[in-house]
Amino acid sequence: MNKTIKLAFTATFTALAIAANTFTIPLTPSNSISFTIAISFIAGIYLGPLSALTVGYLGDLIGAIIHPMGPYNWFMALSCALTGFICALVYKLKLHKLLKLAIAMVIYLIVCSIALNTFGLWLQIIVGVDSSPIGLLQFWGMDKGGIRKSFWVYLAGRLPFMLINWAVNGAVVAILQQSKALDKMFAQINKRTEKKRLEKEQAEEKPEETN
């Protein structure tokens, strides 16, 4: 895939990620189903690590600007950036694609959902400090005795809803993979791009042959 096509698809997936961050399916007041994981994973699979990182981060940042839901959560932003990036790295392994998807989904669950997302929300909602590097410094220097709910108790409350969102997104990516619809689409785009490139090269060679 040439740079122009990749840039265009990066912009397209970023727009989809913004929409997914803006419109979610609520489960509880603080938990919802969002398809940002699936979009970032697809970007990682087909566009590579850097494009996937861009899709995840800009999708979260611009989505937060369009539809703000309190102070910007830097831990969730890092999680969004890493989502597709992790997937892209895992997909470089020479394994069956469903096994690669399973590995990427497990790493995402542990690193992004359980660790970064939950910790960032816990800092913001329970501890009451900014979910940012400054807030993290405040947290380490404060008296922990006044915190009404530990991270692990907060995680236990979120875990069922996180697993629902995780499973739904994983199923979406698996279905798209097995259908091979995206494989066919990107293969067709690459074929057309290569054909145009060859035609352009041939057109540039003809005047030289005439002379």
Image (tube, grey):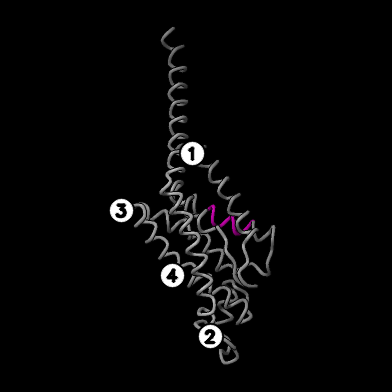
**Mark with earlier residue (4, 2):** 4
What residue is disc 3 on? 95
Q: How packed is label 2: few (under 14 Cα within 10 Å), some, or many (20 or more)?
A: few
Q: Nearer the viewer, residue 65 or 19?
A: 19
Task: Check disc 2 and give the amino acid type.
Answer: Ser
- Give the Cα separation between the discs numbered 2 and 1: 47 Å
Classify mark 4: residues with Cα within 10 Å, few (<14), some (14-19) or many (20+): few
Residue 90 lies in what quarter of the image?
Answer: bottom left
| Dominant secondary structure of the residues highlighted in magenta in the image | helix
Q: Foreground mark, 1 or 3? A: 3
Secondary structure under tag 3 reads loop
Q: Earlier in the sequence, mark 4 or mark 1?
A: 1
Name the residue beneath numbered marker 4: 110
Residue 109 drawn at (x, y percent): 45, 67
Point out the image quarter for the N terminus.
top left
- Nearer-N-terminus badge (1/3): 1
Q: For the residues carrying marks 2 and 3, which lies nearer the camera in this image? A: 3
Amino acid type, callout 4: Ile
In whole angstroms, how far apart are the C-alphas of marks 4 and 1?
33 Å
Q: Which mark is residue 150?
A: 2
How many angstroms separate mark 4 from mark 2 (CA)? 18 Å
Magenta region:
54-62
Task: Give the numbered dot on residue 3.
Answer: 1
Q: Tag 4 or tag 3, which sits nearer the N-term? A: 3
Task: Assess whether residue 21 is covered by the magenta stretch.
Answer: no
Give me the disc on residue 142. none
Question: As shown in the figure, which amino acid type bears the numbered disc 3?
Answer: Leu
